[in-house]
Image: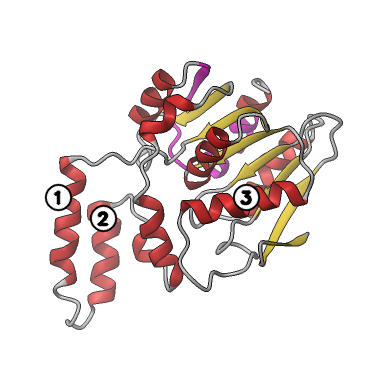
Amino acid sequence: MEKIINGIKTNYQIFGEGDGLALLILHGWGSNSERWTDVANLLAEKNIKIIVPDLPGFGNSQTLDTPWNMNNYIKWLEGFIQEINLGEFYLAGHSFGGALAVKYAIGHPQAVKKLFLISAASVRTKTTKKSAYKNLAKIVKVFSFLPGYAFFRKAFYKFIIRKSDYPYVEGTMKDTYKNVILEDLSQFTGFIKIPTILIWGDKDKSTPIDDAYFMNKKIKSSKLVIIEGAGHALNKECPDVLAEKIINNV
């Protein structure tokens, strides 16, 4: 399905009909609604209506003409929710989508019945290790004139830094990515008053389990659900288990 939201062509999928509150799922960076098909179908079998949009710049939604930041995505999300007349709903966000879900829930507590944060990338505190990686990346950039630099750069991010999506983005999305990772929502986490379910893999290397413990402590009305042996992409690694954890906590 498709709608124009704030001038942006937005593709989205609906799974099931359901007779209760709908669940809106926000996918992660570099992902799309198709990658949530397995989870969405399993949830729809339990009489839950699922809505999964392709975030602007991803999937079949419109590419961005200019770089966006978190506020741009929140304005788009507000428009999307209004356009499809969600009313009160359940909100789930994975990784980057989890950060969006955090920011939206803080500003619109009356709209969200329950919040599901799945490996949410909302804690972006600066550490000595991160600073060292940033400085090392600057050094690597000095050699951009050398033949084979593009290959070497991707190898550097994949095998040295390992957790960055940066080398795989192009054009306006490169600056959008920079804008997004600059916003650390950890200081606002305690403002979430909505019942919240934190779902995390204990082997997650992109959003470490320590982030989950931090958020669980800050959000007084939260519950932490850990999936043992799972990494970051829970929707692809164990869709059946993830769907079960959501169903058990709706």
Residue matched to label 2: 159
| Image quadrant where residue 206 sits | top left
In the drawing, what numbered circle is on residue 132?
Answer: 1
Q: Secondary structure at mark 3?
A: helix
Does label 2 or label 3 sit earlier along the sequence? 3
Residue beneath the point at 63% across and 56% down: 54
| In front: label 2 or label 3 | 3
> 116 above or below 224?
below
| In front: label 1 or label 3 | 3
Could you tell me residue 196's position as x and y percent?
55, 24
Does label 1 or label 3 sit earlier along the sequence? 3
Q: Is residue 230 left or right of residue 26?
A: left
> How far apart in space, not on screen, are marks 1 and 3 (Cα)?
35 Å
Q: Is residue 23 left or right of residue 125?
A: right
Inspect this view and state whether residue 97 appears.
yes
Could you tell me residue 79's position as x and y percent?
68, 52
> How far apart in space, not on screen, are marks 2 and 3 (Cα)?
34 Å
Could you tell me residue 97's position as x and y percent?
53, 45
Please provide the residue range marked out in magenta: 221-243
Q: Secondary structure at mark 1?
A: helix
Amino acid type of the residue tagged 3 in the rendering: Leu
Q: What crowding class fits label 3: few (fewer than 14 Cα within 10 Å), some (14-19), or many (20 or more)?
A: many
Could you tell me residue 125's position as x and y percent?
28, 39
In the drawing, what numbered circle is on residue 77?
Answer: 3
In the drawing, what numbered circle is on residue 27?
Answer: none
